[in-house]
Amino acid sequence: MKKSLKEKSADTALYLFMILIIVITLYPFYYCLVMSFNNGHDSNRGGIYLFPRVFTLANYEVAFQNHQMGKALLVTTARTVVGTLSSVLFTAAVAYGLSKENLMFRKFYMIMGITTMYFSGGLIPFYFVLKSLSMLNTFMVFIIPNLFGFFNAILFIAFFKNIPASLKEAARIDGASEAFVFFRIVLRLSTPILATIALFNGIGQWNSWFDSQFFTTNPNLKTLQLILFETIALAAGQEKLKQQLGVTNESAAYTLESIRYATMMIAIGPIIAIYPFITKYFTKGIMLGAVKG
């Protein structure tokens, strides 16, 4: 159907508005990327908007100087992959059980789960629980406590209720077990919500530094975020010492601010690279999961 001039004008205005929103959203990330590749002292002069004026890799060299960076990257990648897969599978399995209306004490389980969304035991009791379970200073301290989240379970429950019950009943009539129905039917039809919860968990695992800071003292278990945090703290300390001594080092290609830009890009780069590939599943999953919550 041919659009009228008024409709074309409205579409054009809408496209321009969306382009403006995209630019406003993405430009801060691009600005950080540009500044991370620019000489730190030159950046202090200002006036850099689209491209590095004095290109340098010194900011990234300083960020990667820590000899534990490679090991921390492996630990962070491992906890992100293992933690995300185990959490998604465990939460989905629990949510599948809670989605059954005939489950005994279902309302009690739901009330208990919702309560945990608003109240927690606090850091000290949580620490002693982990200690009593001998999880301190182990890789499992990154995995076990993050296995289940009730908010994610609610999204799973709402999505599972959208799957036609006739499919599951037909499978059971043919002799399929409950595990077969869950793994071969329910999970196969739940790609959008699986991608959504995986994104939630993946970002949380990748960005987490709190558990590495407080629940581990083994340097081999330091995560990338903690190493970057320590790098920034060290650079800040050196900068403060130089200020106190009245020492200036203009020949250095980096400053504390430029190192911060570089570490920021190292931290968010992998997530930004993955995000576009699961955006369509994320949108569909979060919408369907929210409709019948």
Image (cartoon, rainbow, N blue to C red):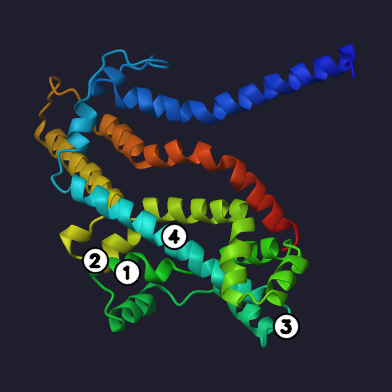
State the residue in front, 48 or 92.
92
Q: CA distance from mark 1 to mark 3?
A: 35 Å
Q: Quadrant of residue 264?
A: top left
Mark found first going from the N terminus, 1 or 4: 4
In this picture, is 226 found above or below 64? below
| Label drawn at residue 141 | 1
Q: Which residue is mark 3?
A: 102
Could you tell me if the residues under marks 2 and 1 are in contact, i.e. CB atoms within 8 Å?
yes
Q: Please state, as top left, top right, bottom left or bottom right, where the N terminus lies in the image.
A: top right
**Three-letter amino acid code of the residue under disc 2:** Thr
- Report, in whole angstroms, how far the alpha carbon at label 2 lies from the one at label 1: 8 Å
Marked residue nearer the N-terminal end (4 or 2) = 4
The image's mark for residue 95 is none
Q: Dividing the image into 4 quarters, which one contains the C terminus? A: bottom right
Callout 1 amino acid: Val
Give the spatial CA distance, label 3 vs label 2: 43 Å
Residue that badge 4 annotates: 85
Q: Residue furthest bottom?
A: 104
| Residue 211 visible within the image | yes
Q: Earlier in the sequence, mark 4 or mark 3?
A: 4
Q: Nearer the viewer, mark 2 or mark 1?
A: 1
Q: Position of residue 187 (x, y in %)?
A: 59, 61
